[in-house]
Image: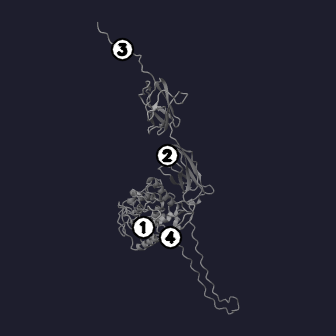
Amino acid sequence: MAAHFGRRLRKGAATTAVAAAAVAALSASQAPGATGEDPGRQTTAGTSTPVPDASSDGNATGDSPYYTDLPPLNSPEPSPSSTAGTPVAQGAAEAAIPATVLDAYKKAEAELRSAKPGCNLPWQLLAAIGKVESGQARGGRVDADGTTLSQILGPALDGNGFALIKDTDHGAYDGNTRYDQAVGPMQFIPSTWAWAGRDGNGDGKKDPNNVYDAALAAGHYLCRNDWDLSQQAGLHSAILSYNNSQDYLNLVLNWLEYYRKGTHSVPDGTGDLPSHRSDNGTGHGTGDTAPHTTHPKPSTPPKTKPAPKPDPKPDKPGGGNESPEPTPPKPPTPPTPPQTPTDTVDHLQDAGTAELTAMAGDAFTARISTRAENKVGKSVAKVRIRFTITGDTDATFAGGETVATVATDAKGVATAPALQAGEKTGDFKVTTAVVGRSVKGVGYTASVTARAADTLARTSDTALTCTPGGEFAEQLQVKATYKGAVADKVAATATLIKSDTDAAENDKGPYFKDADGKTVRTLTGLQTDDKGLLTLPKLYADDTTGTFLLRVTTTGGATLTVELKVAAADSSASPSPSPSASS
């Protein structure tokens, strides 16, 4: 299919001129706004705008087949209460995106926002390419994990009307051991998937037939070469690298603009299916066994009876000379889409989640579990639950994501990935929602506490002594632990106190020096290193002699009190007398 990365395909049938003319006509009428430097200026894609060269790394696809169905001239407008990018509740069939496919695009955008923030990838671009490449995975014919129910394969690249690309994967992805074929909803050829493939749904596999994996891989592919997709040049270069065709660029830009005006989700498997391709085909090549959109045949009009002969009794009302009008056929009743598990969900219920508390930098031991239930409280399996972290926090799910989507198991329970605490302390929220359906969710509160230590110990047992007016030869070093493990990055305070029973700061005896050389007897803002060690600055003594106390405390309650002795040098010992001379 179209996204045959890494190798150019020969141009399709000569009849592509018809599709090209249609795309050009739409471009002229819709004139999608360029996402370039001037947001107030609109540019007609493919006319006056110079088209940059495609990728310089040889990964352009050429003029390979793709769906040429055009978006309506009137784009869907979001409701006034909707925010930008929020799916609208109703809209044209062309604006509908199957729920799991839409979730995959948005999840990929969220990950790229973190992994490659300078790319500025909009999920609507993935939707536009997915529409053109596979009709949104054949109208969303995917399972609860996002894998297509049957393979979507492009034509065999056997050199017959296409490029000659001999088998590179031993048929592992496309089932063809002679030639490569593009695979999956975003149409990767195996040789490109080998380096571009990603695991988008966290199942440990990189499957081009999975819409989560394919969408994330496409996002990374579009974001390579440091392209900024919020700028016109970067956007055009990225699209042309997917398929090096001006008509393809125009078509994707039109779908991108259309989706930006608003979309709405529909149940998986009920999306609108395109029917026109750039090579005049109607399918996706071998392996595309899914039926395309069909229109019911009109009912056959009933045969009318011949007009009756004139009534010999014309004085009778009506005369019997009128021919009865044929009964118009009843419009066909559209088929009712089959009910999916998602359609039966009434609400979400907590499934026994324990208290969510963790120390900064640590993983949460408890995991969030949510159950999908129908109206009578029965659990619903194979439903995708989206978990979203909100609030002023740097906590994430394992893997660095703030959004995770998990399918419910046979008991209707979806367990979110483990939470990982960041360095920000305080509370944050995790909300749940059913992908593709608006029902009552569950909100969870999680707390991140400051790093702590429960034990402090000296790393040396050398006595700390000094003469009046001098300085202590050894610097005090302590090690912090928490439940026997190293306690790193723990805040600490050191104070020279008056006595064991009076923790007030002493006004005489040993002291530290600040940056200006002034006397200080309390140090704040201290922190253990990655080994849990804390080395205090050098200590000095004034002229007061005696035994003094230095107390070190940490977050978590660990405390260590150390004795400091200031005494005059011992002068009681007299030098040994010189030996007397022999007499």
Residue 298 drawn above or below residue 134: below
Dots 1 and 3: beta carbons under 8 Å? no
Q: For the residues labelled 2 and 4, say whether their Cβ atoms are less than 8 Å apart.
A: no
Q: Residue tagged by mark 4?
A: 73
> Hey, which quadrant is residue 240 in on the image?
bottom left
Which amino acid type is marked by label 1? Tyr
Do residues under tags 4 and 3 come within 8 Å of each other at their CB atoms? no
Sequence-first disc among 2 and 4: 4
Q: Tag 1's secondary structure?
A: helix
Query: Which amino acid is tagged 2?
Result: Gly
**For the residues carrying marks 3 and 2, which lies nearer the camera in this image?**
3
- Labels 2, 4: front one: 4
Mark 2 touches mark 1? (CB < 8 Å):
no
**Which SS class for mark 4?**
loop
Q: Which residue carries the number 3 mark?
A: 576
- Residue pushed farthest left? 583
Q: Which residue is mark 1?
A: 248
Which residue sits at x=65%, y=89%?
321
User: Reading the chain from its start, which is encountered first: label 2 or label 1?
Assistant: 1
* 205 and 66: which is toward the camera: 66
Q: Earlier in the sequence, mark 4 or mark 3?
A: 4
